[in-house]
Amino acid sequence: MDLHLNPKDLAFRGRIRAFLDENLSPETRRAASLTTGFIHDPEIAVVFHRALHRVGWSVPHWPVEHGGTGWTAVERYIFESECARAGAPIYNGAGSHMVGPVIMHFGTEEQKKKYLPRIVAGEDCWAQGYSEPGSGSDLASLRTRAVREGEHYVINGQKIWTTHAHKANRIFALVRTSTGGKKQEGISFLLMDMNLPGITVRPIIGNGGDHEFNEVFFDNVRAPVSGLVGEENKGWEVAKYLLEFERGGNPAAGRVRAQFTRVVNLIGAKCPGDPDIAARLGELGSDLDAMEMIELCALSASQAGVNPGPMSSLLKLRWSQLRQQIAELALDALGVDALRWIGERPLYETLRLPASEEELLAVTPRYLNFRAYTILGGTTEIQTGILARAMLGL
Amino acid sequence: MNLQYTTEQNLLRESAGKFLAARYDYPCYQRICAAEPGWSAQIWAEFAQLGWLGLPFSEDQGGSGGGAVEIAILMEAFGRSLVLEPYIATVLLGGGLVAALGSREQRDSLLGALIEGRMHLAFAHRDGAAAVKAERRGSNYVISGTKKAVIAAPSADPLLVSAALGEGAIGVVVLPKSARGLALRPYPMVHGARAADVELDDITVPASAMLGANEDAAASIERVIDGAIAALSADAVGAMAAMVAATVEYTRTRVQFGQPIAKFQALQHRMVDMKVREEEARASCLFATLSLDGPAAQRSRAVSGAKAKIGRCARSVHQAAIQLHGAIGTTNELSLGAYAKRLLAYETLFGTTREHLRRYAAIISDPDVSATGLLHDPAAAAVPGKEEWTST
């Protein structure tokens, strides 16, 4: 066993660093660092995504035939860590990490040809139409109806918490195509364009001041049947497959470490030597080291062809908590400065201050928005229930 | 990077688990704990036969050249089975210091007997080297001072004692128990280990009693202690794993309100918390274990971080385990209480959770360190100047 980067890994890291030096502009970096929501705005992220696309790195985790890189797990880990460390934004995970893998696995040849290259190139921006007002954690109870009429589904209903629906040009949605039998049966997975007549988007402004969430209304929307992924009424299997990707996701340690290091700097500037803050910093740092190690063990297992087991749920559970606790420590380190509030978004367009002051204004909105981390993608309580079954056999 | 056990390591894990399951059950632990000397000569002899006492030493010293991972595998099994035999004190601290600092003659005379199971060592270092002074007088040293809470001292002979040599240097003296002026106040510790406070009153020893020549032993002591912390952490992980498993098992069989209490969501979630702490502790321990051979700066970050993290995990796991067992969890009718005491000891030995948290926080407050992930660049590791972090 060892934690060494071998000479090949180091050469790879050198290539990634050189690329980032050249292609990640100070403007993009600043915009990413002043992002207060939990997802980067596609407008700023797409610039970097296209730079990645030019060298073939925009979807590193995909199979090579669809535009992936064929990197080893360690190389992907290095890539993600270096991007995070450099402050690079992530473009539309709903495309590259959710619907992309689903289309590869369940989609028709025609769907693959139509959608995948556009995700690779950053030409499409996807939204995820899952939750409904009455269907949050109990997702399978969803009621948005899709009735087949010839070559179209006629859709009526409502989605909610649809991240970036106001920026997306496409949406994948779970819709009810049958009402008999178990609630998991009768769900279908449907791809649609956001510009179809009858789709309206209403913003939901987060407590942190950001517009990330939306309600999406479907009023007699006629969506082509060619957008059906997998079989009609078998959408729940597709949804579960997607959830595996969402929870497994990218190696997250680099992102959380970058967030942590910013707080280390903030504390160094605002309250060096405060023993209470230092103790919490130490606790979070050692939590972060432990979680990075768990992630590396899961990577090593998957590289060796061993099933890493229920670790993806554990990682989701703990990473989301850690992100919140780091944001919380930043808030507490600021003292009364945390109360200064600028309501306009995005901050990277609003602010014209010295860098060190701008950073402070992002702290409180980020703290508030980050409360969503333990709710979205399966709440902490849902993950804990999954772990009770998977790790303890309860 | 590779974090998979080798075939040999898996075999060691299986054989250690099997041996201890057969030879070291809870009644056996209770018997050994209740009588002096607080460990079993029979078991110790079997450890020697299994090659475990020579595990960390090189083959030319009579050992089998095992690394930190092998030690951690063994220690996790020891923790699971509540092993009382003073492996860390004798093999890792005592043997480790002799191997690191000793002259050829010292290694030959001490390590051979240790590996064969004929000699126990203990390292008196608590309160730091300054608690004991070694003054050079001609070809002798005169040793004076007090060392508290020296684990395994009652059974060990000789004792290894860290001492201030003057001008900031530290040495390790090999003191036979028979030395005139050496007094022991032995006592048992909460988790069953035997310890003693050691008084040294103007003991005269020849210069050859110093381990190695006159070089400063501080760096070697720190490395050996970091190794002992990683090993003790693996022991704590084993103890935690046993407590989590026992708690899950107990809640499956305990029926209240007409059903096993494991069916209640409040209890399920609390047990998941315990399991997550166990997994985090195991990962943290592995990070420390795999950082032991690296440069001092990396090692300190990993070891102090692990001690701080695992100490917190240990406390929350032992408290939750007792709570979920209900009243029976507060008694010594079950092995649970012995595990709780073992974890309590973990939190304090080789520096408390708070002390290590402070040390780790100071290290991680350097943004260059906090920004660095866990994968090591072996070449960049040797950057001079960062070594000073370590000495606290």
Image (cartoon, grey):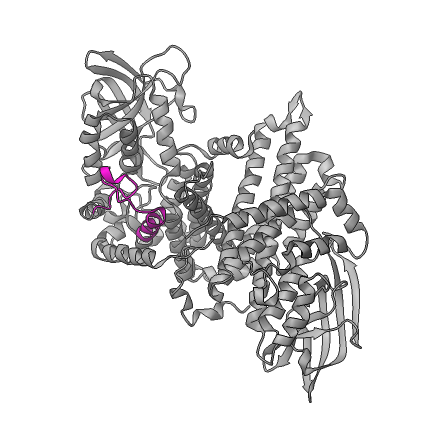
B210 above or below B41? Answer: below
A15 above or below A67? Answer: below
Give the residue drawn at x 79%, y 71%: B183
Q: Is residue A131 visible?
A: no
Image coords of residue B32 (percent x, y): 77, 50
Q: Is residue B246 left or right of residue A258?
A: right
Image coords of residue A390 (percent x, y): 51, 32
Residue most extreme to the bottom = B138
Say whether residue A76 is magenta.
yes
Q: From the viewer's side, name the closer residue of A286 and A250.
A: A250
The number of callouts visible is 0
Q: From the viewer's side, name the closer residue of A127 and A269.
A: A127
Image coords of residue B64 (percent x, y): 58, 60
Give the residue drawn at x 72%, y 56%: B45
Give the residue drawn at x 47%, y 31%: A382
Q: Tell me the quarter of the image containing the C terminus of chain A.
A: top right
